[in-house]
Amino acid sequence: MLWTAKEAVAATGGLSAIDWDCSGVSIDTRTLQKGDLFVALKAARDGHDFVAQALEKGAAAALVSHIPEGVEPDAPLLIVKDVLTGLEDLGKAARARVAGKVVAVTGSVGKTSTKEMLRKVLSGQGKTHAAEASYNNHWGVPLTLARMPRDTEFAVIEIGMNHPGEIAPLAKMARPHVAMVTTVAPAHLAAFESLEGIAREKASIFEGLEAGGTAIFNGDLEVSDVLAKAANKAAEVCVSFGEMDDATARLSEVKIGDKATTAQATLANETCLFKVPVPGRHYAKNGIGALAVAEALDLDLAIAVSDLGQWEPGAGRGLREVIALDSVESQLTIELIDDAYNANPASLAASLEVLAAADVTDGIGRIKSGRRVAYLGDMKELGASEEELHRAVATYPSLQEIDVVHCIGPLMQSLYEALPAEKQGRWTETAAEMVEGLARDLDAGDVVLAKGSLSMGVGRVVDAIRKLGHVASSNNEGAS
């Protein structure tokens, strides 16, 4: 039992005509489970239009601001003045009743991957709660909190932003014992005047820290001093992580392999060796940050290192898959790097570095040599410098090792025109147009990266690549 009617009424100040209890909280009738409290938020559609359907599907009750049309007055309703405020009140009450430790994570890049690393690391040492998806905005954070079981020992709360002033109120709602900033990069520049402005917004997560809390931040950035200043102001303990000599949690050596990254680090004045089963220097950095969180929570680091080695990225976030092109000739494969969930200059640079280090297979396709191929969609919300930032991708060192770049979107046209002719693949305005010629682009032995901002629909390219054959395996499974 997650909430009783009495507890929910006390938390929200709402009214409920009958008694009920719920085992979960849902905002979507498509994923609603029997026994959930349905929250009738207003988004693209008014959630009140779906209350009757939610109750028919077995919702225990619905959080509403009025009795919806088609719903009886004696139905199990929790009536409040404003539904979002009611959800926030539930989140605050859930946080107040939990005696466990709370970790909050933000960053321009890597916050969801780091949240999942932390879920893996913390779950090995206590009952851990974290959102299943990237629920990190003004409704996602209170929803994650409202879903938090009362016996939670560790919670990981991801906090994001699009505009100034968003992070601090959510951090104060979460009241973390440990708060972490993964990195600060040129993302959302359309809403901020500079990288320093983004850093100040990210650093405001430290304002929510509980007394005696720990602030953990990336020390390798040009704006790390902004993070350090905010951390020192708000936290009892400040921990920097990265490759700089003065980092508290320091990466001394990173080796990027085809299927895994190993790193040697110094943490709490002790040397440790850890692995993440996916290639990428950025994963090693987020990994040492996750271990720094474990250290701040006084967990067993040996267990944490072992559990970190079992983590793998989810779909759209660097997941690697082998696509078998022929059901008989099993050697005819393409390797797919699915990083299509989002993109900004920092995350794109990291993904291209991974592609550049990937091992291709020669001599098995129409073309004698396997190739490293990228499908890149527009990076959004970069402000006035967006064309310049796209064009600059042509100068990334990793491009030297990449054979073909296909570009999607009006902004990526700037990159396409800046590429050497021998690296130019195709340019299309939309992902749907790119998909049309996809089968002719690729060959057995290739390694393919797909990346772009979510609104560009680069996931269509990923789906089309998968449909060229069938997924034979995930290269993250069993990597060593």
Image (cartoon, grey):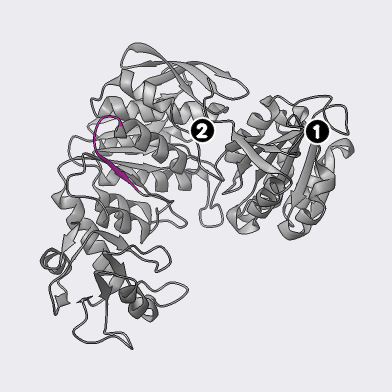
Mark 2 crowd level (few <14, some 14–19, many ≥20, 10 Å Cα): few
Nearest the eye: 74 or 93: 74
Q: Which quadrant does the N terminus fall into?
A: bottom left
User: How many numbered badges does the structure rendering display?
Assistant: 2
Nearest the eye: 312 or 157: 312
Q: Position of residue 397 (x, y in %)?
A: 71, 28
Q: Which residue corresponds to the image point at 31% horizontal and 54% vertical from the top-left?
A: 144
Decide: is 172 above or below 87. above
Question: In the image, which is nearer the foreground, mark 1 or mark 2?
Answer: 1
Mark 1 crowd level (few <14, some 14–19, many ≥20, 10 Å Cα): some
Magenta-colored span: 124-130
Decide: is 221 above or below 47. above
SS for callout 1: loop
Q: Residue 122 is drawn in which quadrant?
A: top left
Q: Position of residue 13 (x, y in %)?
A: 14, 71
Q: Amino acid at mark 1?
A: Asp
Q: Which residue corresponds to the image point at 79% horizontal and 31% vertical from the top-left?
A: 371
Q: Which residue corresponds to the image point at 80% horizontal and 33% vertical from the top-left?
A: 403
Decide: is 153 above or below 457. above
Nearest the eye: 100 or 265: 100
Viewer can see residue 174: yes
Seen in the image, is 200 located left or right of residue 88?
Answer: right
Q: Which disc number belongs to residue 403?
A: 1
Q: Which residue corresponds to the image point at 14% horizontal and 80% vertical from the top-left?
A: 17
Per the image, the residue denoted by label 2 is 222
Whether 451 is among the magenta residues is no
Q: Position of residue 263 (x, y in %)?
A: 49, 18
Seen in the image, is 243 located left or right of residue 178?
Answer: right
Mark sitting earlier along the chain (1/2):
2
Spatial CA distance of label 1 from label 2 is: 31 Å
